[in-house]
Image: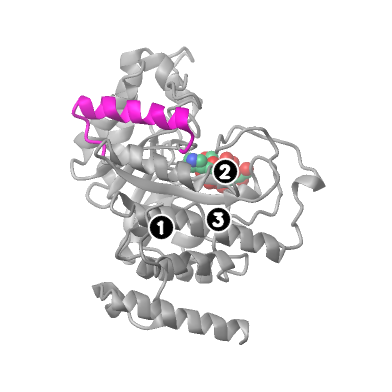
Amino acid sequence: MTHRHLRAALAASLCLAACSRATSTASVSGTPKDQGLKDTFRSAFLVGVAIAPKQFEELDVANAALVKREFNTISPENVLKWVIVHPQPDRYDFAPADKYVAFGERNGMFIIGHTLVWHSQVPAWVFQDAQGQPLTRDALLARMKDHIQTVVGRYKGRIKGWDVVNEALNEDGTLRETQWMKIIGPDYIAKAFQFAHEADPAAELYYNDYNLDYAAKRDGAVRLVKSLLDQGIPVKAIGSQEHLKLTTPSAAAVDSSIKAFAALGVHVNMTELDIDLLPPATRNTGADVSLRAGPSPSLNPWAAGLPDSMQTKLARRYQDLFRVYMANKDAIDRVTFWGVSDGDSWLNGWPVPGRTSYPLLFDRQLGKKAAYEAVSEVAKEPRVVP
Ligand code: G3I
């Protein structure tokens, strides 16, 4: 059987699986050609992807078509970050974000906003007065409120869920000493949620972070979200970014975190899933965007292509993770990949610039990798609680 025939047979069997679950969209969306991950997992959770102008302006037609075929929720990789949407005190630039939201609406997708309060990608002026001196607590709260209410208010009823606060925790589970924290104090987090809720009471509000499958940080997130809930703050879900490595964290650790969050009574979103296969360039795990390391050939071993043995390992790793997600599907609202194809991934540039990374389900030609098939198989398995 040729590769193409194998793919056709698999597509047919996937269609059978998806169609036999008899969900409305699978049957109305038409031919098996239109089936994607969104259909495969329709009875479990939404499947999403982070997109950039290339996709939402349809500059790359094939890439945009893939997004429409495969995904039913989108996240903005960059265009709703403070530095882009609000570059100067009196200037908002909504042009890119408007196009992002319009793409989601045209295609009937669940549209996510990312992110309102973060320590990264926020201009220095945000924390300073006109003389360049640090703002007072009240002035920074007023600025945060204006930003959140302007941005959330613009897309009220259209952006359905917001990463309100992003990456507020250190690895040991304590609060990160960001400018927000230093100037406002720990209640900056509750205030951000309160402002977002006032701006769009129907929007889902999320706390989002990386490395939440490690015990100390996971426990910090549990403490943080519990304290928000105790104050009556409507946190709908914890977003676990899921920037993972091939063997760490373990699938069991991922399972534990999902269960720990669900026990709080909130939902869980896997928000930025990718699996970094490349040799570690720093000792740090996770996704701290400030990390940088110099290029070297040993750090970029597969510039000419990924060996089959590694494709297989990636497929198994994704399969293990999706087994955990399926086992916890009642707690999980969505699983979102951080980028469409390997060529689109931020991991080609972080922490070492110019590497060739293979963290996603689609290759550089937009073809389905073995990991895609492996993940799809999981939807057909009987449910096993790990
Ligand atoms: O838009 C400018 C462009 O004009 C300029 O020529 C170019 C030169 O470097 O930079 C472009 O901006 C870059 C931007 O991505 C858009 O491509 C920034 O330098 C670069 O820092 C930025 O990286 C993004 C990073 O967040 C920092 O915001 C990545 O694309 C994005 O994938 C990454 O996403 C984060 C999540 O928001 C939060 N969790 C971790 C995740 C991965 O770091």
Q: Is residue 22 above or below residue 241?
A: below
Give the image location of residue 117, x and y in percent: 39, 32
> Residue drawn 58% across and 83% down?
4
Q: Which quadrant holds residue 81?
A: top left
Residue segment shown in magenta: 213-235
> Residue drawn 60% across and 65% down?
363
Label 1: which residue? Answer: 48
- Of the residues shown, which amino acid type is indicated by label 1? Gly
Mark 2 and mark 1 residues within 8 Å of each other at the beta carbon: no
> Residue drawn 41% across and 48% down?
270
Give the image location of residue 283, x and y in percent: 66, 32
Q: Earlier in the sequence, mark 1 or mark 3?
A: 1
Give the image location of residue 383, x and y in percent: 35, 61
Residue 240 lies left or right of residue 266; in this view the side is right
Q: Is residue 224 magenta?
A: yes
Label 2: which residue? Answer: 248
Label 3: which residue? Answer: 317
Give the image location of residue 294, x and y in percent: 75, 37
Mark 2 residue CB less than 8 A from any atom of ligand 1: no
Q: Earlier in the sequence, mark 3 or mark 2?
A: 2
Residue 290 lies left or right of residue 179; in this view the side is right
**Quadrant of the image where one finds ligand 1:** top right
The quadrant of the image that shows the N terminus is: bottom right
